[in-house]
Image: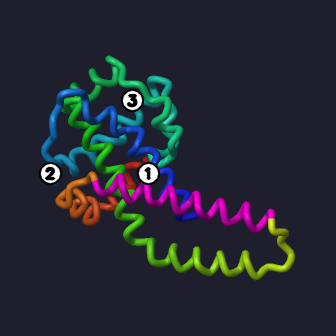
Amino acid sequence: MPNARIVALSAACLLLAPLAFPAGAGDPKPFTAKELNRFIADYPAFAAHMRDEGETLRNVREPETWETMQVTSRMTDHLKKQGWEPERFLYVISHVAAGLAAVTLEEQAPALEEHLVEAHAEIMDNPYLSQEMKQQLLDQMRQGLADMRKLDQAGRDVPEEELQLIRKNKKRILKAFEGP
């Protein structure tokens, strides 16, 4: 379901934010096309390294992927060997995740809103659902909307120039995240 992917992306970028902005780091400059291309090329090796270290990276769009991730010296050593400053890599990955979520929401929002209106009407008009069941379903819809708002907020923190790069490279980013 598209909404589940949006929620997962939102959670991933919200969980990554503290890693990408170390205390006292100030406002980092937006990533460039060159950095994004490098990130897309280097991400599969990073994911493989994390798997080798015992971290399960099933999909970067799943919240549990990042909930248990800890920045270790071996991770930072690996990133440095790839030529990255670890903080910069984490900045790029967090902004790519947040931006990808925002772009996905941007693309799917009109259809999703239409679907929610139709679903609301179907729930309310269904004579076979109890009032309690209707309320539960409507509560789930409200939670989904709240999650979408969080996603929208996360995307607002991504500079427009990064969003443009993410839009342009979305397929390549998704392919890198999905792995071989």
Q: Amino acid at mark 3?
A: His
In this rendering, the label closer to the viewer, 3 or 1 = 1
The residue nearer to you, when weighing 155 against 65, is: 155
Q: Is residue 148 above or below residue 177?
A: below
SS class, disc 3: helix
Sequence-earlier tag: 2 or 1: 1
Residue for point 32% across, 43% down: 94
- Tell me the quarter of the picture where residue 46 sits: top left
Lower position in the chain sequence, tag 3 or tag 2: 2
Residue at 45% x, 23% y is: 53
Percent coordinates x, y for residue 131 in the rendering = 81, 68
Quarter of the image holding residue 162? bottom left
Q: Which residue in the structure is indicated by mark 1?
A: 10
Q: Position of residue 77 (x, y in %)?
A: 27, 21
Q: Please report the residue visible at 46 percent of the width from the left and 46 percent of the height from the top.
A: 11
Measure the C-alpha gap from mark 3 to mark 1: 24 Å
All told, the count of numbered labels is 3
Horizontal arrangement in the rendering, residue 119 relative to residue 53 (left or right)? right
Closer to the camera, 174 or 130? 130
Question: At 14% from the left edge and 51% from the top edge, which residue is drawn?
Answer: 32
Residue bearing the label numbered 2: 32
Task: Please give the range of residues in magenta.
Answer: 132-156
Res 119 seen here: yes
- Dividing the image into 4 quarters, which one contains the N terminus? bottom right
Q: Are marks 3 and 2 in contact (CB under 8 Å)?
A: no
Residue 49: mark:
3
Tag 2's secondary structure?
loop
User: CA separation, marks 3 and 2?
Assistant: 24 Å
